[in-house]
Amino acid sequence: MEMRSAGGDAVRPPAMADVARVAGVSPQTVSRTLSGHPSVQESTRAKVLAAVDQLGYRKNNAARVLSSGRSRSIGVVMLRTVFYSRVTLMYGIESAAQEAGYSVSAATTDCLDTAAIEDALSRLTDQGVDGVILAVPLMHVSRRIEQLTRSVPTVTIDGSRTPATEVVAVDQSLAARLATRHLLDLGHETVWHVAGPGEWLEAASRTRGWRDTLEAEGRVVPPELEGDWSPESGYRNGLILGRIPDVTAVFVASDEMAFGVVRALHELGRRVPDDISVVGVDDIALASYCSPPLTTVAQPFADMGALAVHHLVRHLNDPDAAPEPAAVEPALVVRASTAPPGGSRGEKPPRGSSSGV
């Protein structure tokens, strides 16, 4: 609860001194109690904790660490998911943080709702983290998020940005252009698209890159289909695409959805790449073991996580350093899921691409 003035107006949240006054002890005793110090008697501990509950006091670790230097911890806001890209990104963050001498504290959210992200950021700042990596795509930034990212050094991944953050991002529009250009260069008249969910910045950027490439070439832009990043959503959309006779090439916004598309096409008797070529995005570990091996646009998720940590640590060591947005370029990896219309594969992949195994 908030402390109030004599006129009843809300003034501020309760502080440690208020807990001490209600418990009848010194602020130092409150501090020792909340830190779990063994010298505090059980009766005193009980009084302090009762005062904490009565006042609704929230322990401010940020204030505590100011007296002893940095907490040597980095907070990460991330969507709760089992998708390969998020897991690999977190691996890169944790590995780089450990190398730099920092621990990692994650605050996950089940959705991209602004209030949920505000809550996750608040939890991390209350813990007193030295800095935050915001690894969720923000379509809209609230005033509260701006305030929180101004209160602690912040680096964002996935293209999100507030006025107080640095950015580490893959050029998602370029990823889409690479995939679409590859299919057009093979001789396909147009390219269909299975997009990611509309509330994700990456999905919107990939759709824009696909559409811009087709329009620049004067090609027909087919209606886009939307998935949710899951193989199941790719499968559902694959069942639609496989029943459209004119479809010869599909750009899918993630490898995991592409696996579902390939499965659906196989069940419908449409051969990949003989009848329909398929390109994904991400180059996850299973992409080269798909049947056929999946042509995809690689994104170095672990490297992105490490780069975000490096940017954050650089800022912590030199707060006056100017922000340095970092763009990570994607790369086309050509495998066996793409071919010219009719399935006649050439001897060499298009110039400028790389081959996978």
Image (spheres, rainbow, N blue to C red):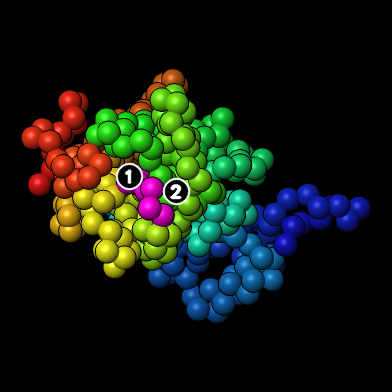
| Image coords of residue 260 (percent x, y) | 33, 61
Q: Relative to 211, is 252 on the left or the right? A: left
Circle number at residue 249: 1
What residue is shown at x 16% (from left), y 47% (from top)?
A: 336
Q: Residues within 10 Å of mark 2 (few under 14, many from 20)?
A: many
Is 308 or 110 nearer to us in this picture? 110
Label 2, secondary structure: give it: strand
Q: Relative to 47, is 42 on the left or the right? A: left
Which image quadrant for residue 48? bottom right
Q: Which residue is mark 2?
A: 195
| Image coords of residue 153 (percent x, y) | 47, 36
Q: Nearer the viewer, mark 1 or mark 2?
A: 1
What residue is shown at x 56% (from left), y 62% (from top)?
A: 30
- In the rendered structure, which segment of residues is drawn in magenta? 244-251
Which image quadrant for residue 143? top right
Q: Secondary structure of the magenta portion, mostly?
A: loop
Give the vertical position of 200 relative to 20 (above or below).
above
Label 1, secondary structure: give it: strand
Q: Earlier in the sequence, mark 1 or mark 2?
A: 2
| Image coords of residue 41 (percent x, y) | 49, 75
Contact? badges 1 and 2 (CB < 8 Å)? no
Is 45 or 160 nearer to us in this picture? 160
- Furthest residue to the bottom? 43
Is 320 or 330 nearer to us in this picture? 330
| Image coords of residue 290 (percent x, y) | 19, 57
**Magenta stretch: residue 248 in it?**
yes
Q: Indicate the amino acid at tag 1.
A: Ala
What residue is shown at x 23% (from left), y 57% (from top)?
A: 271
Is 69 or 9 nearer to us in this picture? 9
- Furthest residue to the right? 7
Residue 279 in view, yes or no: yes
**Magenta stretch: residue 30 in it?**
no
